[in-house]
Image (tube, helix red, strand yellow):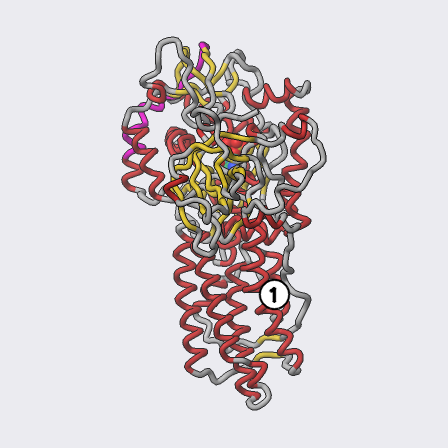
């Protein structure tokens, strides 16, 4: 059968439901939504699948801890997922739950097929298991383990548990050669491509058959033909990508054949092994085509640690809504977190970026252009005679469009939108250099040309930015007298746009308003000790223990160029990681006097922007009788990261 080309099927991972979604969960989901919406801009029919992963030991344990039956426990979180996705404009086509009847039937059909063709056999598993990651930890993950020790999970680093149980195994090892052949023939299967190395090395070092059932837990899909077993949660969960669109349901064959294979599957780097090795092998066994591309993104971090519920450092996306609005948060996640890397999150950075990019660069330009046109009774844009300046601007727009399409296709969304913002800068530069507010006094045609060129540029920006900020860009399009239609290839249209479009201009209130966070205390802002001697009220021990004082060693000292006081210190806090901590002590210490010294740091100060950097803590000093600063130290060296009390 000829594969339909004008469709785009994209999936998010399905989320464990042990809590409400956090900013990390939103990140995977927004990336998938942006991919779907960009493909709508290419005129395609799209399908976005998301949902929840509800079986397995991790959920069963969390439910037991909450004193609830597992189904009742997971039911309690579903609305919070749906509500978060709704408020963040995630336009999913289906929300799958692995407790759905249709999913259960599809997984059981898959197992029966594999069993019938000899891909599954019964044996027993003796080894280690990581419950938070729901992973059987294989021997090659703990090659040099000392006798009697329990290995750490290779993904999350937490201790594993020893398990011994009867299991059904999937003959994963027999798929190794086919997998390697597939990777060789599809070098773009994983993006970013450098993540392929980890997958290749895992497969090349030899695959073991995979346990796909469990007998020591009961919260799972019953294994067909052997009710003592439930399906291993990853074998259950991965199949959601096909069960949702009708796999193994004869009544839905046309739907399944239309959408499968997935065009893009979005996932975090922690679950690459499951998606790039086990999942393709499962599909090969089922005789199905493999997904076209996996987008493997990095982690959002708080300081140096992954944002995760178990570390208790999660940011609730719902709490950001009131201050920032959904569009601005979406923009920040897509544009300022490089999809290829881990990235720290702070509200200060979020605020700075929104104010710079959305308020200063985009919203102000739209507002000035529209207000000026209105003041001069210019309600529409019609045909123009362009000059060299507008031709140059249009060429920049064309170059940006082509680079944008390439980057979006490679899923380098952060780079694609950096290119769009470069064009927004070009538009600003053009608009301000032309000084339309002055030329209107002497040359009406010139004035109208500047407004018209700016409006054409803004129109291109609105269409390209719509996938990330749908609501605001629909507002911008409305100001330009345009509405979006489905099934139109806007990218193609922009490529052939000769900038002779008509626009009806309707100014509205600004797209974005400046966000002001409460001012930090002045002394803290510059990292100085001034005013630190004022008497402060007594505190209780409970107040004191809120301050995390850690010993740490300075491993690098750099001068902060924009400041005459600040050093950027790289500080090794042992298990708490390596941090950048700014300190305003330049006139008291040379870099050499600080380097390799162990000092005392307040480690749980909220990250704070300082002169273009973000400081993740504060170093302590005391002032001696001569007014010179002395480092606060521990009497003798202690391990880095030691908490002082
Ligand atoms: N249930 C499995 C996925 C099964 S897919 C068949 C799972 N769930 S999860 O809830 O733990 O994670 C879901 C997704 O959220 C993963 O892609 C994970 O990488 C992502 N994130 C969770 N925390 C994250 C950050 N702090 N930053 C970015 N993404 C993060 O794994």
Residue designated by label 1: 476
Q: Secondary structure at mark 1?
A: helix
Image spot of residue 517 (x, y percent)? 64, 51
Image spot of residue 507 (x, y percent)? 66, 71
Q: Quadrant of residue 592?
A: top left
Whether residue 170 is in magenta: the answer is yes
Please, is residue 420 above or below residue 542 in the view? below
Answer whether residue 468 is visible to the viewer in this image.
yes
Mark 1: is the Cβ under 8 angstroms from ligand 1? no
Q: In the image, is 66 to the left or to the right of 496?
A: right
Whether residue 471 is in magenta: the answer is no
Residue located at (46% from left, 19% from top): 159
Residue located at (67% from left, 30% from top): 543
Image spot of residue 209 (x, y percent)? 36, 20
Q: Quadrant of residue 387?
A: bottom left
Please, is residue 214 above or below residue 450 in the view? above
Answer whether residue 13 is visible to the viewer in this image.
no
- Nearer to the camera, 353 or 564: 564
Instruction: Give the extent of the magenta segment.
Output: 164-180
Residue located at (54% from left, 68% from top): 459
Quarter holding the N terminus?
A: top left
Image spot of residue 487 (x, y percent)? 53, 59
Q: Quadrant of residue 416?
A: bottom left
- Nearer to the camera, 462 or 104: 462
């Amino acid at each position: 059968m000829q594969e339909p080309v004008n469709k785009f099927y994209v999936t998010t991972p399905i989320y464990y439901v042990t809590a409400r979604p956090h900013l990390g969960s939103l990140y995977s989901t927004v990336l998938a939504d942006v991919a779907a919406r960009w493909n709508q801009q290419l005129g395609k029919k799209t399908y976005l699948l998301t949902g929840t992963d509800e079986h397995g030991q991790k959920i069963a344990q969390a439910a037991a801890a909450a004193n609830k039956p597992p189904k009742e426990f997971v039911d309690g979180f579903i609305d919070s997922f749906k509500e978060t996705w709704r408020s963040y404009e995630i336009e999913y086509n289906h929300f799958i739950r692995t407790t759905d009847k249709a999913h259960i039937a599809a997984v059981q059909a898959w197992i029966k097929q594999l069993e019938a063709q000899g891909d599954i056999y019964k044996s027993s598993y003796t080894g280690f298991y990581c419950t938070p990651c729901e992973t059987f930890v294989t021997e090659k993950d703990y090659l040099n383990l000392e006798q009697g020790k329990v290995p750490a999970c290779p993904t999350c680093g937490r201790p594993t548990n020893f398990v011994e149980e009867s299991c059904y195994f999937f003959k994963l090892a027999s798929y190794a050669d086919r997998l390697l052949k597939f990777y060789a023939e599809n070098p773009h299967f994983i993006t970013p491509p450098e993540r392929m190395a980890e997958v290749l090395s895992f497969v090349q070092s030899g695959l073991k058959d995979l346990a796909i059932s469990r007998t020591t837990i009961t919260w799972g899909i019953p294994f067909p033909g052997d009710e003592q077993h439930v399906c291993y949660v990853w074998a259950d969960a991965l199949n959601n990508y096909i069960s949702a669109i009708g796999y193994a349901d004869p009544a839905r064959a046309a739907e399944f054949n239309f959408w499968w294979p997935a065009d893009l599957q979005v996932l975090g780097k922690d679950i690459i092994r499951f998606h790039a090795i086990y999942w393709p092998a499962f599909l090969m066994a089922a005789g199905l085509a493999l997904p076209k591309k996996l987008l493997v993104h990095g982690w959002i971090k708080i300081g140096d640690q992954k944002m995760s519920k178990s570390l208790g450092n999660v940011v609730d996306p719902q709490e950001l809504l009131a201050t920032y609005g959904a569009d601005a948060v979406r923009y920040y996640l897509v544009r300022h977190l490089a999809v290829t890397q881990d990235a720290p999150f702070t509200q200060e950075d979020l605020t700075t970026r929104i104010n710079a990019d959305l308020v200063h660069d985009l919203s102000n330009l739209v507002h000035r252009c529209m207000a000026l046109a209105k003041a001069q009774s210019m309600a529409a844009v019609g045909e123009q005679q362009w000059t060299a300046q507008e031709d140059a601007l249009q060429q920049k727009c064309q170059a940006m469009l082509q680079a944008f399409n390439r980057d979006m296709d490679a899923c380098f969304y952060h780079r694609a939108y950096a290119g769009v913002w470069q064009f927004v800068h070009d538009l600003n530069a053009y608009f301000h250099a032309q000084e339309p507010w002055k030329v209107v006094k002497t040359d009406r045609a010139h004035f109208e040309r500047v407004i018209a060129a700016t409006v054409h540029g803004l129109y291109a920006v609105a269409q390209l930015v719509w996938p990330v900020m749908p609501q605001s860009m629909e507002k911008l399009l409305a100001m330009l007298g345009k509405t979006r239609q489905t099934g139109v290839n806007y990218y193609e249209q922009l490529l052939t746009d000769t900038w002779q479009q008509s626009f009806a201009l309707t100014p509205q209130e600004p797209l974005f308003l400046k966000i002001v966070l409460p001012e930090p205390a002045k002394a803290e802002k510059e990292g100085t000790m001034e005013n630190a001697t004022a008497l402060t009220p007594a505190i209780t021990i409970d107040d004191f223990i809120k301050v995390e004082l850690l010993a740490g060693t300075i491993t690098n000292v750099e001068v902060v160029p924009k400041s005459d006081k600040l050093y950027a210190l790289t500080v090794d806090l042992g298990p708490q990681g390596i941090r950048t901590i700014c300190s305003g002590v330049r006139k008291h210490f040379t870099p050499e006097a600080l380097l390799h010294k162990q000092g005392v740091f307040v480690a749980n100060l909220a990250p704070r922007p300082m002169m273009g950097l973000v400081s993740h803590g504060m170093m302590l000093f005391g002032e001696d009788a001569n007014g010179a600063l002395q480092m606060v130290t521990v009497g003798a060296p202690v391990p880095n990261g030691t908490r002082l009390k």
